[in-house]
Amino acid sequence: HNDCDENLSCGKNEPHIEFPFELVKEMEEPCTYPRLCLSCTEKRQTMLLLPTIKLRVNYIDYESQEIYLTDPENCYSNKFMEVINFIRSYHLEARYGEPENNLIFFNCTSAGLPYLRNNYMRQDMVSCPIYMANSFESVLSLDLTSCTKMFNITAPIAAVHSNALYLRWPKPNCAECEAKGKRCKWKTNNDTEGDIQCFECKRKGIHVPKSFIFAATGSIFLGLVVIAVFKGILYFRKKQEDQERVDKFLEDYRAEKPARFTYADLKRITNGFKENLGEGAHGAVFRGKLSSEIQVAVKILNNTDVEGKEFINEVGIMGKIHHINVVRLLGFCAEGFHRALVYNFFPNGSLQSFIFPPEDKDHFLGWEKLQHISLGIAKGIEYLHQGCNHPIIHFDINPHNVLLDDNFTPKISDFGLAKLCSKNPSVVSMTAARGTLGYIAPEVFSRNFGNVSYKSDIYSYGMLLLEMVGGRKNVDMSSPEDFNVLYPDWIHNLVDGDVHIHVEDEDDVKIAKKLAIIGLWCIQWQPGNRPSIKSVIHMLETQDENQIAVPPNPFHSATSTTVKGPTSTRRPLHLEVIEE
Ligand SMILES: Nc1ncnc2c1ncn2[C@@H]1O[C@H](COP(=O)(O)OP(=O)(O)OP(=O)(O)O)[C@@H](O)[C@H]1O
């Protein structure tokens, strides 16, 4: 042990030892005043060491400064003189008795221990032949008549009839020392004044120099500062890089060039591809945000069989295409096998979700708006066909590929995708089926009907117009083996004045008729009979519906109300390679 041991004791359930007591080895130097020495027995019992006797210490209460002692031999009277000396010299106080008590000692050796008969308290004093009594106790009542009186003494304690001795010690003055966070111990030399020595605990015996503690704390602090600075630099550098990227993007945006994004950028922009806008034949589309103002749609392409370099070239060309009615390509990603296109986001989605019959007043857009949309799409097609450095045939004009901005201005999308994506029929099957059944010009799936040209897009556009006028799907897909091309005859009735659709306003009837007539011209079987996109725009913009000649029935059967489509025997369809 050492003086600083906070849990010092002889064993479990034994009293805790601290100042003013100290633990010593029994055989060491004698313990003299003012030291209060305790030792441990082999059985781990705590003993108080007096010059010639030992008393068992059962309990120490440091609060009330009391120690409870018992005599291991159950015979205090034998050692009473030493106990009295101890109490006197250490200025102790006994719990029982007056400061001065008259005690009488009796020798009961020859009496054959008569007191055992009466007093149960003395039963444990069998081995104790000397009996002490308080002077006020009656010799008769104690049944000491057969004992011989030995002598009287005055003692600071009353006679002890049981084996218990409670003593209180005066508080030694350690307050000043404890206030300094130090400990007290009894002095072993007389170098300084007083009995008590104040000392500092050296815990666990390991001496840690203060300089070392300062150095260690300093290093930890310095380390933390370095880490914080490093993290700060990284954070600001990343912020700066992000800012530079946004600046670069905005520069490209203003210069109308598509920006190049990494896959990680796309992940960040789309917040981990959280909001899926839909799934097309070429891949999934996700909503994203480039800055607080610029919202984007990111199309992750699958089945791209285009090399990275080629992809970038193509996208570069697509990025130069700017027209109010064509979706603008803001950026792209070509990293490893990842290919993606980034467009402006249009909250209204595709035209497909706005096609409703006129009688559905809650959803129908209105004839004015339909005319505005038709004209916009036509202008977009005109730009693709004639306005760019590289004329573009879209091949897949349909309501899914027309997006609507906040003002319902149409934007043609998905141009160039046919070139960037695999033409594997199974991959484009949905588009192919929709296009084949509804929108794809006859010459695109069979050269027997003529050469593929810009007029193929006119056909698709015509079908789109008729679908808008009718407000329903242009093909009844329920019996694909024997599908009916429903519109043309129905539309012919409209053109002939037999208005089946619900049109209230006279002006609206005019718009409906005009759109229907233009639609019918556009879906003429022979590409040569279809108008150019320029004349479509001219008709839409300037001409009255009555000035436009009524087209012949495109399916050249004036009698039949339903015409068997030419593709029913040609499925599954496979798009032929078209020379670009
Ligand atoms: N720029 C965009 N802004 C808002 N929504 C978009 C945008 N681009 C696509 N979408 C939505 O994402 C969905 C999927 O579009 P995508 O163009 O991939 O497929 P599609 O045109 O429906 O089919 P396909 O690829 O066969 O032509 C569509 O429903 C469309 O409404």
Image: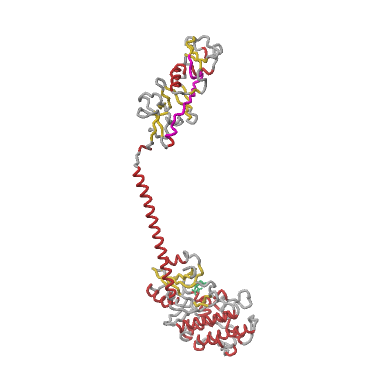
- Whether residue 159 is visible here, answered yes or no, is no
Magenta stretch holds residue 159:
yes
> Residue drawn at (47%, 74%), measured in percent from left and top?
428
- Residue 143 to residue 48: above or below: above
Residue 201 in view of the camera: yes
Q: Position of residue 331 (x, y in %)?
A: 43, 72
Q: How many marks?
A: 0
Q: Quadrant of the C terminus?
A: bottom left
- Res 469 → quadrant: bottom right
Magenta highlight on residue 41: no
Residue 307 occupies quadrant: bottom left
Name the residue located 40 percent from the left edge and 69 percent from the top edge: 337
Front residue of this view, candidates 540 and 501? 540
In the rendered image, the quadrant that contains the N terminus is top left
Q: Point out the stretch of residues depicted in magenta.
A: 153-177
Which residue appears farthest toward the front when viewing the image?
A: 193
| Residue sticking out furthest to the right | 504
Residue 516 at x, y percent in the picture:
58, 84
In this view, the residue in front, 554 or 75, is 75
Q: Position of residue 385 (x, y in %)?
A: 46, 83
Q: Looking at the picture, how far across and down is residue 59, in whole percent?
A: 47, 28
